[in-house]
Amino acid sequence: MWDKFTSISLIKRILIGIIVGAVLGVGVPHLTWITILGDLFVNSLKAIAPLLVFLLILSSMAKHEKGSKTHMRSIVVLYLTATLVAAVVAVGASYLFPVEIFLPKVSETTTAAPKGIATVLKGVLNNAIENPVKALVEGQYLSILVWASLIGVGLRAAGKQTKQVVNDLSNAVTSVVQFIIQLAPFGIVGLVFTSVSESGLNGLAKYGQLVLLVVGSMMFVSLIVYPAMVALMTHQNPYPLTLFTLRESGIPAFFTRSSAVNIPINMELCRRLGLSKKTYAISIPLGASANSGGAAMTISIMTLATTHTLGMEVSFPLAFLLCLLSAISATGASGIAGGSLLLIPMACSLFGISNDIAMQVVGVGFIIGVIQDSVETAVNSASDLLFTATAEFADLRRAGTPVNISERVRQAKANDSATQEDEELDAQAVENEAGE
């Protein structure tokens, strides 16, 4: 039974959940017990998310080997810069096109707006050194981030077995989260039912506005911002390479919704582009987690949508702090389905927004995740390939051996055609042998 259930694509199950929830909300709004499904889903995520974030950060920091050299400084700088720039664009878009979301259990006076940057910084610093056990229990993500990082650094000197135990614990909690996410369609039924039964279809309309803001911002980054970075580094027309990566890498990633699953595709595309295997063998797997511009955008937009809904006025210094926090926390989020959504409470804590409210926003994120997660993964995965190629081409230009990028892209397309022809010939030969 479970195998049949999970054999259906999660995105299809969530779509069915949205439709069922909307129909029930319009047809039988008096059946309030259906809201329990949404409450159980949100509360289970709220319970496990702090532990997940703690162990992911702890494991990531502990894995680092002192003195290890990757010779990939330019690629890493590109990854981190792109993630920060994407977060800045998301914040700017949220200011230009403010969107509110329907949060049924939040009153207008639930949360007071921050009174200034000094007050916020004081609160951030105090929260950052909160008791780690209390932070895990109450979901205080800034403290979780700080203590997990410090303990993780301390574990770098530990033995391999200790690090393996930490990694196994992280994987175990990740599997629990993935199990909960598999049950998301039932939670979506309850969340959509609550929204429709209490506010009519207007609640869903606001979700549509949020989707447009998220997707529009991501497309702007992919088609304008990232190409500008490529042009700045290579001094060539960036669009042949940009469009090639979006078509060949972004489209498969859109449907698989997993940067990790798309790694073999990106590795093959790097080979076709004639890139150095010593470089892309490291940069592509690294980019699947470290290059998270789409995740940073999701975190920023959802957080600011929450502040708009609560009537908060967010100053520029606070918005910049949000960009930094989103960029830092987004690193590593791409390895988990819905990972960026589970980091929203960390960003919300910057503004003093309670964990209860933040987890309702996470629930909204799963509703729009039918589109948001697919676009986010496409942006992240395509840019892994884009920045790997850009860094190598830029290094070659600085070394005095510039590469014609348009010609490389044409060769990559020709290589694909040749590979397909070879595969067809091999298949035909096998058929002929079988016939004989």
Image: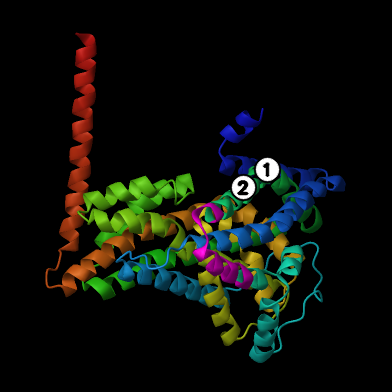
Q: Amino acid at mark 2?
A: Ala
Instruction: Give SS at disc 1.
Output: loop
Q: Which residue is mark 1?
A: 183
Q: Which residue is mark 2?
A: 172
Residue at image location 42% in from the left, 70% down from the top? 80
Comparing 332 with 22, the one in front is 332
Q: Is residue 244 left or right of residue 187?
A: left
Q: Nearer the viewer, mark 1 or mark 2?
A: 2
Q: Point out which mark residue 92 bears.
A: none
Instruction: Specify start and end residues of the magenta stretch as a single range.
Output: 146-162
135 lies above or below 200: below
Instruction: Give SS at disc 2.
Output: helix
Q: Is residue 25 visible?
A: yes
Quadrant location, the N terminus: top right
Comparing 200 with 232, the one in front is 232
Our reading of the magenta stretch's main secondary structure is helix
Residue at image location 63% in from the left, 57% down from the top? 52
Q: Is residue 205 visible?
A: no
Quadrant location, the C terminus: top left
Q: Is residue 335 left or right of residue 204?
A: left
Q: Is residue 67 left or right of residue 276?
A: right
Residue at image location 67% in from the left, 58% down from the top? 51
Q: Amino acid at mark 1?
A: Leu
Residue 23 in the image: x percent, y percent?
73, 43
Residue 164 in the image: x percent, y percent?
53, 51
Does 156 lie within the magenta span?
yes
Q: Earlier in the sequence, mark 1 or mark 2?
A: 2
| CA distance for labels 1 and 2 | 17 Å
Residue 390 in the image: x percent, y percent?
27, 65
